[in-house]
């Protein structure tokens, strides 16, 4: 979730959507978020997850770039903002490469637990880089989440060095991913031009997709036989199945990005709802991995354990607590240092959407 701010003095009109549509879209948002780490595990089992080729991440960002189809009516970004967006995308390439490489090493359950901390990392980096105030309840939730991550880290040591290394990659990848959100917030709150969330996401996804495409041409193409085809043959993967897995990764990435905008704009509850949805994703990944992969693929990292359950409960409680604390601080009008800014949902509407909202209110 992007931790974007808006000024209470210039809040855009509130748009409403039918409840059943919002519920459906929010469900698709959670479902796509749950399936992504599971699909990465399927890519690993199919021999498609070589960490140097990153062919599965090419599919991932191809899906994100597809959001451009939803941004046709939005204003184009200036070249200056486009270049800055490309730089932010480069940071996220490193972040997501670490996250999903770590996921293939540590398994989807540990990935889900640690990746839930992105919201907390976002708050901490906003405090450091944007000098944003945090209430004592928000600080308490940060402590709770990091305690839960500590439990996850110690439990991963018992699962072998590869799982432990994967867990470390996900921790640092989650922090870098949060940095991308904070930098994106700065760009999207650019006072010199209107930056819609959909247009920004499309440019960011296209930039990352292009960089990964260059990597495929310069590196993967030369090592395709030994790093992709041979592992596929050893795993018994057909070309058709490989394409299905990669297409599913791209499709879920596109669906997750597309439903994100509707979810953050219309789902009631603001920050609390965002925290609950993130926590729900972690719980569902935890359950789905145990059911689908335990005793079928990998080792103990795929199965339910007491340590994982404890750490999951702690992290989920911390994330939900942070969302609730954020909502309380917003109601009280807590100000950041030097500016009227608080943690809020994305409300970056395009000129087209704002004009439509004004007409509906007349």
Image (cartoon, rainbow, N blue to C red):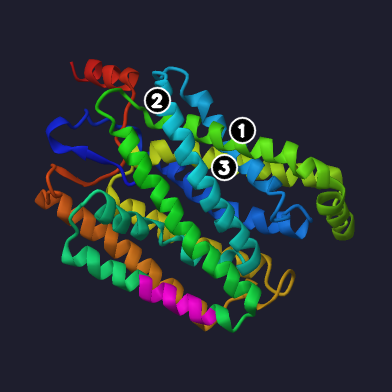
Please indicate whether residue 256 sits to the left or right of residue 197 in the image: right
Contact flag, marks 1 and 3 (Cβ < 8 Å): no
Name the residue beneath numbered marker 3: 253
Is 150 magenta? The answer is: yes
Label 3, secondary structure: give it.
Answer: helix
Residue that appears at 82% across and 43% down = 222
Q: Nearer the viewer, residue 280 or 239?
A: 239
Label 2, secondary structure: give it.
Answer: helix
Closer to us: mark 3 or mark 2? 2
Residue that appears at 72% across and 58% down = 44
Query: For the residues marked 1 and 3, what is the alpha-carbon distance in whole angstroms?
Result: 16 Å
Q: Earlier in the sequence, mark 1 or mark 3?
A: 1
Please indicate whether residue 319 sits to the left or right of residue 297 in the image: left
Q: Nearer the viewer, residue 41 or 186?
A: 186
Name the residue beneath numbered marker 2: 80
- Residue 279: which quarter of the image? bottom left
């Amino acid at each position: 979730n992007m931790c974007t701010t808006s000024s209470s003095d210039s809040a855009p009109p509130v748009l409403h959507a039918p409840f059943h549509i919002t519920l459906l879209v929010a469900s698709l948002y959670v479902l796509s978020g749950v399936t992504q780490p599971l699909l990465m595990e399927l890519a690993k089992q199919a021999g498609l997850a070589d960490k140097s080729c990153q062919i599965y991440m090419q599919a991932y960002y191809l899906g994100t770039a597809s959001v451009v189809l939803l941004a046709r009516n939005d204003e184009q970004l200036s070249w200056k903002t486009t270049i800055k967006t490309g730089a932010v995308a480069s940071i996220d390439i490193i972040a997501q490469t670490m996250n999903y490489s770590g996921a293939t090493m540590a398994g989807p359950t540990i990935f889900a637990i640690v990746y839930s901390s992105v919201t907390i990392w976002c708050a901490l980096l906003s405090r450091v880089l944007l000098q944003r105030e945090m209430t004592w309840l928000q600080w308490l939730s940060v402590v709770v989440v990091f305690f839960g991550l500590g439990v996850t880290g110690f439990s991963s040591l018992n699962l072998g060095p590869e799982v432990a290394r994967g867990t470390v990659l996900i921790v640092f990848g989650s922090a870098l991913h949060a940095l991308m959100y904070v930098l994106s917030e700065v760009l999207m709150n650019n006072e010199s031009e209107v930056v819609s969330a959909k247009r920004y996401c499309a440019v960011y996804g296209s930039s990352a997709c292009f960089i990964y495409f260059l990597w495929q041409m310069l590196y993967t193409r030369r090592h395709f036989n030994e790093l992709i085809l041979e592992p596929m043959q050893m795993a018994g993967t057909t070309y058709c199945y490989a394409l299905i897995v990669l297409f599913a990764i791209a499709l879920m990435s596109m669906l997750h990005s597309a439903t994100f905008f509707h979810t953050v704009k219309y789902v009631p509850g603001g920050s609390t709802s965002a925290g609950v949805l993130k926590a729900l994703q972690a719980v569902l990944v935890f359950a789905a991995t145990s059911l689908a992969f335990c005793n079928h693929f990998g080792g103990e990292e795929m199965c339910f354990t007491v340590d994982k359950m404890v750490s999951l409960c702690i992290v989920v409680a911390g994330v939900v607590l942070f969302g609730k604390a954020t909502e309380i601080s917003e109601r009280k009008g807590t100000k950041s240092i030097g500016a009227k800014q608080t943690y809020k949902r994305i409300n970056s509407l395009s000129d087209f959407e704002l004009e439509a909202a004004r007409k509906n209110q007349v």
